[in-house]
Amino acid sequence: MPCDNLPELGGPDICQVDGGGLLLPLLGNAEQEWPNGVRAALYLIGLLWCFLGVALIADVFMGAIEKVTSKRVLIDDKVLGKKRTKTVWNPTVANLTLMALGSSAPEILLNVIGAFPYFTSGELGPSTIVGSAAFNLLCITAVCVVAIPGGQTRKIKDVGVFSITAFFSVFAYIWLLVILMLWTPDVVSTAEGVLTFLFFWVLVVLAFLADTGKLPGTAKPPAGCTVHPANTPAE
């Protein structure tokens, strides 16, 4: 699948005269002729300033998302026979959509910005997203296991939702191999992008159905009810 209008290979590097990136150098070739030490110091200051801005924006964004997802309404519970409060957002859906978007917004924006202007993968974008996902899957899971005090155990409260999210966590890597090595090698087509986006909504819908007990094997007892083991014939 050919890619047109791509920059020619073998051109000057971004830090050399006549070279450049998406934003830098701001002053053109005049900036490229500055001493490397001066440019490195200025770029480091600018990078730290951008990191500070991203941290502030992400903090406000996450606070707003938590405010939205924690909203509760008063409803009539026919099972309990009284009024009770209920969250507007399903916790599972909120974690998979808004919370994930808030925590991953910086790397998503980095990948989107890096794709312009030729819609090609940059040196940071895809690696950042795949690396972050691998870190969450391996390192965070390991930390959660190691953090359990000795002699104690933890159980997964909702195995149905866990099974679905665990499957899609591994399926995402397999899907990347399919679209980048088998289907259209080294190119992500529009059809592949649309399918990838649709898989996300399949994950959200299946997780929601499992969380609400609407999938086979995920039924839950009504609120306020206690499940007792069945009596044996001897009893």
Image (cartoon, rainbow, N blue to C red):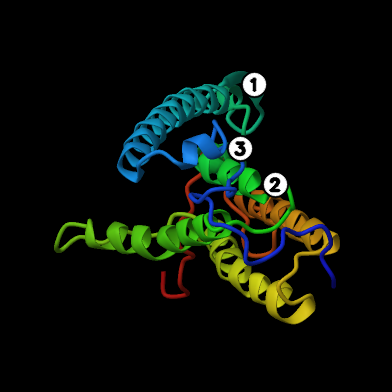
- The first of marks 2 and 1 along the sequence is 1
Residue under the image location 70 percent in, 77 percent down:
178
Looking at the picture, how far across and down is residue 144, in whole percent?
A: 31, 57
> Which type of secondary structure does the marked residue at label 2 adopt?
loop
Q: Earlier in the sequence, mark 3 or mark 1?
A: 1
At numbered mark 1, what does the secondary structure look like: helix, strand or loop? Answer: strand
Q: Which amino acid does label 3 sit on?
A: Asn
Q: In which quarter of the image is residue 86?
A: top right
Splitting the image into 4 quarters, where does residue 177 fall? bottom right
Q: In this view, does 180 lie above or below 150?
A: below
The answer to whether one can see residue 9 in this image is yes
Front-most of residues 61 and 75: 61
Q: Callout 3: helix, strand or loop?
A: loop
Residue contact at pointers 3 and 1, CB within 8 angstroms? no
Q: How far apart are marks 3 and 2 (CA)?
A: 36 Å
Residue hosting label 3: 90
Residue tagged by mark 2? 116
Sequence-first tag of 3 and 2: 3
Quarter holding the C terminus is bottom left
| Residue located at (57% from left, 54% from top) | 125
Task: Give the image location of residue 206, x and y in percent.
Answer: 69, 56
Closer to the camera, 79 or 153?
Answer: 153
Question: Which sits in the foreground, 23 or 94?
Answer: 23
Q: Name the residue under label 1.
A: 75
Q: Residues within 10 Å of mark 1 (few under 14, many from 20)?
A: few
How many numbered discs sit on the rendered protein?
A: 3
